[in-house]
């Protein structure tokens, strides 16, 4: 038996607590960014989305279902209206706080990376991938509406 196995058997965890073992890892090499690398087009899209997220904070909180019905019933809906409804819905119906950095920031948050991947999946018709991405961040009662808004936002961009 290895020393690690003997150590784990000798000290069983108390019910309700967990034993945390260090995962051996290496530091990032010098000059490698911890944030994911985005293409120039993705960076430009992210800057635009950051502005929409910032502007949407000034908008009143709508009823998500009613807003989606109104947007679906109109023929020519502006990109700004879709973006406002999407970001307001995301701030109200997310399963946890969503982090967007201010426009001009060089770093990329995990939520911003998620948003780029979501819009890419919606734009390319990868509906199962978009649904899975929505499920990771949105509460169940709002997933249908957020999928609609994400798809509409991707088409409008």
Image (cartoon, rainbow, N blue to C red):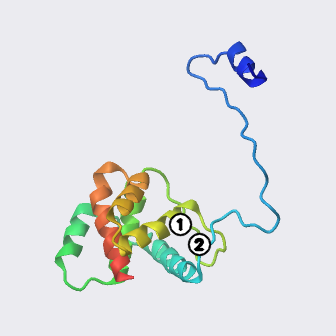
Is residue 40 positioned above or below 126 on the image? below
Is residue 39 positioned above or below 30 on the image? below
Q: Marks 1/2: CA distance?
A: 11 Å
Q: Residue furthest left?
A: 73
Count numbered badges in the picture: 2
Tell us which disc is closer to us: 1 or 2: 1
Quarter of the view holding residue 86 = bottom left
Q: Where is mark 2, residue-wise?
A: 102
Q: Position of residue 131 (x, y in %)?
A: 35, 59
Residue 63 seen in this snapshot: no
Q: Which mark is residue 112?
A: 1
Q: Position of residue 155 (x, y in %)?
A: 34, 79
Q: Earlier in the sequence, mark 1 or mark 2?
A: 2
Left or right, residue 98 beside residue 81: right
User: Viewer-proximal residue, 126 or 115?
Assistant: 126
On-image quarter of the C terminus: bottom left
Q: Position of residue 42 (x, y in %)?
A: 54, 78
Quarter of the view holding residue 32 = bottom right
Quarter of the view holding residue 99 = bottom right
What kind of element bears circle 1?
helix
Q: Position of residue 13 (x, y in %)?
A: 63, 18
Left or right, residue 90 beside residue 73: right
What kind of element bears circle 2?
loop
Residue 90 seen in this snapshot: yes
Q: Decide: few, some or many residues near mark 2? Use Cα within 10 Å; few <14, some 14-19, many ≥20.
A: few
């Amino acid at each position: 038996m290895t020393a690690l196995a003997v150590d784990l058997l000798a000290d069983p965890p108390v019910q309700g607590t967990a034993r945390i073992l260090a995962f051996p890892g290496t530091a990032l090499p010098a000059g490698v960014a911890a944030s994911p690398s985005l293409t120039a087009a993705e960076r430009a899209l992210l800057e635009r989305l950051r502005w929409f997220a910032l502007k949407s904070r000034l908008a009143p909180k709508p009823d998500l279902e009613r807003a989606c019905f109104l947007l679906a019933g109109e023929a020519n809906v502006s990109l700004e209206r879709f973006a406002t409804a999407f970001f307001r819905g995301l701030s109200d119906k997310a399963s946890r706080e969503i982090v967007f950095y201010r426009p001009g920031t060089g770093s990329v948050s995990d939520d911003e990376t998620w948003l780029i991947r979501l819009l890419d999946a919606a734009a390319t018709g990868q509906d199962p991938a978009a649904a899975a991405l929505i499920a990771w961040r949105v509460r169940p009662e709002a997933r249908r509406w957020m999928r609609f808004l994400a798809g509409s936002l991707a088409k409008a961009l």
